[in-house]
Image (spheres, rainbow, N blue to C red):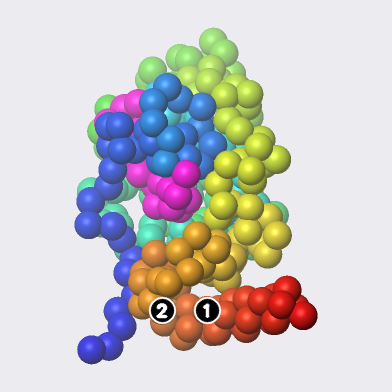
Amino acid sequence: MSFKKKILPVSWKNGDKLTGDLNGIGFLLNGPIHNDAPIEETLIAASIEGMIRRDGRVMSLLTDWITIHASKINGDVLTGMLFALDPSEMRSILVYWCANAQRLKNDLRFERLRRLYQGPRIDYLAMLENERNEDSAGTSLLIRKNGEDQRFTATCMRVPNLVLRHRLKDVMTPAKLSKHHLGYRYRVMMGPTYRADIWALLRKYANLSVSELARRAHSSYNTAKLVKSDYELVKRDYSTRKVA
């Protein structure tokens, strides 16, 4: 049987399951903590919770998380997942991620994401209400009163200032998250790559098959096979030195 690379989860988490994953990747919410939470899958689930289920606190924390940790996102995994979404059903999600890619304009890994939406600027509040009108009177009124959120001024999304709360202290720092999340720690050491994610998986689950490693890391079978081979080589060398 040929290996088929997994793109999207069967369903997106919500409720306590999502809260546990969010805390696992560095959000500071009350609730459970899942230390093995998959980073990109959790980020997209958070944007679904925030945009479609209208959870403003999650959206605020997600936006700050991206500000702090963008350099540790696996751009290839995030891009593949977003382009696999239904563009009609998930329109607001795609606009939000396009806007974030645009504000991270110097990061070449997000170049494809900057083209997720092409058109006139869309109001964040209008998307929350599922309006098709890109320019809502409510947004214009709030921007005249409080100004525009400076993080998104040069993007495809208009956000009034103070709508997305900006409190970086409500998200773990890279130093704390690297102690808390093994996969993140290996991304710090190796870069946000498939190799880092597979290596982290092997450190915790050394007996995982190549297919299962590839599935969990969203990588190709060949990449997982190569990394597992390298890992076992280093492990054997370490064991030999320890005996000697």
Range drawn in magenta: 35-55
From the viewer's perspective, tell me whether residue 161 is left or right of residue 106.
left
Task: Report, in whole angstroms, how far the alpha carbon at label 2 lies from the one at label 1.
Answer: 7 Å
Q: Quadrant of residue 207 in the image?
A: bottom left
From the viewer's perspective, tell me whether residue 238 is left or right of residue 31.
right
Which residue appears at 55% of the width and 63% of the height? 203
Q: Quadrant of residue 65 in the image?
A: top right
Measuring from the top left, give residue 210's x and y in whole percent. 41, 79
Residue hosting label 1: 228
Indicate whether 120 appears above or below 244.
Answer: above
Indicate whether 112 appears above or below 224.
Answer: above
Residue hosting label 2: 210
- Mark 2 touches mark 1? (CB < 8 Å): yes
Which residue appears at 27% of the width and 32% of the height? 15
Q: Kindly identify the amino acid type of the residue bearing the numbered disc 1.
A: Lys
Q: Specify the principal SS of the magenta part.
A: helix
Which residue appears at 56% of the width and 68% of the height? 199
